[in-house]
Image (cartoon, rainbow, N blue to C red):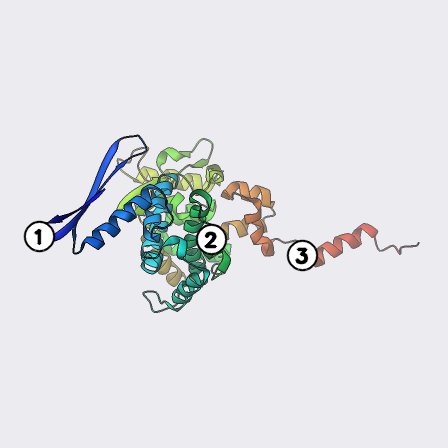
């Protein structure tokens, strides 16, 4: 490691030499420092990173965290995490030494986030605030677990916001029928919403579907992947969770509809995407269709909720529903418990029927 004065530019250059994890000698350098002190500070920071010395800045540790985690996460998951770190966390903590950040500093950051407005001038939602804190805490947890940081200051403070998102809304069968009728003017939209409503799949799962995913003899569709648009690229990933890999039995009318739709797509190949549209397109079509049908506008994801509600109404068990829609845990299905038909009054009535109205004698 060395620092040099470059006479031609009257600036300082720092050169850092190190041995990488494969035992190979490497070198990195940076030019253009106005003072020798600045060049030496950069040099020390590179040494801290190389030795995982927690006297390094938070930004330097995030660089280590990125190297450790990026290849372990789905690309779309890392993309979201990286955006939050870069835009909401590093501007506040980046230049601070990670081992000097205190709970009071996290509280100050939380207060700043609570006061921040989004592009529409509205405060961040409680769910988003909770997500921001979780990402900050994840970095500190990594430092504690693998690099010897004594304590996670974000965990000491506790979260802000809340986990519960917007209240789910559902369409009844009648509301969906009104909506689907007005969507028939655009086949790609009509068939996309048909699959979403009658199969209860997620947006990304829908947009990743190919003709090869359908078995028309068995009347099934296989969910094995998910579509994301990242930095202007089409990215196909694994589904959200391992349980999301599943085979869904379709109703006969939907089998016929999708077979007819594929026949309309001239030249489509087995591995081509069946719905060459974006999530934004679906949202615009939802706006258009709901207005034209005169039904309340729900989120695209609420079509999944509507499908689950329909299955509950038809009397299927939570276990069967969880298997069909790919819930990782049956506990997720139980969040729909308020929709299940068995109520306290019905329980009492059935208990009464067991006794048959006979008076109990001790």
Residue at the spot 32% in from the left edge and 37% down from the top edge:
263
Res 192 visible: yes
Residue at the spot 47% in from the left edge and 50% down from the top edge:
150
Q: Which residue is mark 2?
A: 152
Mark 2 Cα-neighbour bin, 10 Å: few <14, some 14–19, many ≥20: many
Labels 2, 3: front one: 2
Residue 87 position in % (x across, y down): 32, 57
User: Relative to 350, is 250 above or below?
Assistant: above
Where disc 1 sits, the SS reads loop
Q: As drawn, is 154 to the left or to the right of 14?
A: right
The quadrant in which residue 265 appears is top left
Q: Which residue is mark 3?
A: 343
| Mark 2 or mark 3, earlier in chain | 2
User: Relative to 245, is 315 above or below?
Assistant: below
Res 298 visible: no
Q: Which residue is mark 1?
A: 9
Q: Do callouts 2 and 3 mark residues in contact (Cβ within 8 Å)?
A: no
Q: Which mark is residue 210?
A: none
Mark 3 Cα-neighbour bin, 10 Å: few <14, some 14–19, many ≥20: few
Residue 133 position in % (x across, y down): 43, 57
């Amino acid at each position: 490691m060395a620092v040099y004065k470059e006479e031609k530019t009257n600036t300082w250059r720092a050169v850092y030499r190190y041995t990488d994890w494969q035992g190979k000698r490497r070198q990195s350098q940076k030019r253009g420092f106005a003072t020798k002190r600045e060049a030496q500070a950069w040099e020390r920071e590179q040494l801290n990173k190389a030795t995982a010395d927690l006297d390094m800045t938070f930004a330097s540790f995030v660089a280590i965290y990125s190297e450790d985690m990026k290849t372990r996460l789905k690309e779309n998951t890392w993309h979201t995490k990286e955006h939050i770190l870069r835009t909401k966390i590093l501007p506040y903590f980046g230049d601070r030494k990670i081992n000097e950040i205190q709970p009071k500093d996290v509280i100050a950051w939380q207060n700043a986030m609570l006061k921040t407005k989004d592009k529409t001038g509205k405060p961040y939602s409680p769910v988003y605030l909770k997500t921001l804190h979780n990402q900050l805490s994840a970095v500190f947890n990594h430092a504690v677990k693998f690099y010897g940081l004594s304590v996670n200051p974000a965990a000491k403070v506790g979260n802000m916001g809340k986990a519960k998102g917007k209240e789910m809304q559902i369409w009844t069968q009648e509301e969906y029928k009104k909506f689907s009728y007005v969507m028939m003017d655009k086949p790609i939209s009509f068939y996309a919403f048909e699959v979403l409503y009658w199969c209860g799949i997620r947006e990304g799962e829908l947009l990743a579907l190919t003709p090869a995913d359908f078995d028309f003899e068995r009347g099934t569709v296989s969910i094995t992947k998910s579509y994301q648009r990242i930095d202007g690229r089409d990215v196909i990933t694994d589904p959200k969770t391992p349980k999301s890999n599943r085979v869904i039995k379709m109703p006969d009318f939907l089998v016929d509809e999708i077979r007819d739709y594929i026949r309309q797509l001239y030249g489509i190949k087995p591995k081509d995407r069946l719905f060459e549209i974006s999530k934004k397109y679906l949202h615009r079509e939802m706006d258009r269709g709901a207005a034209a049908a005169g039904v309340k506008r729900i989120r695209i994801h609420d079509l999944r909720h509507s499908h689950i509600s329909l299955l509950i109404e038809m009397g299927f068990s939570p276990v069967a529903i969880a298997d069909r829609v790919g819930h990782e845990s049956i506990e997720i299905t139980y969040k729909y418990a308020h929709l299940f038909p068995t109520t306290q009054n019905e329980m009492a009535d059935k208990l009464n029927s067991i006794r048959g109205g006979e008076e109990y004698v001790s």
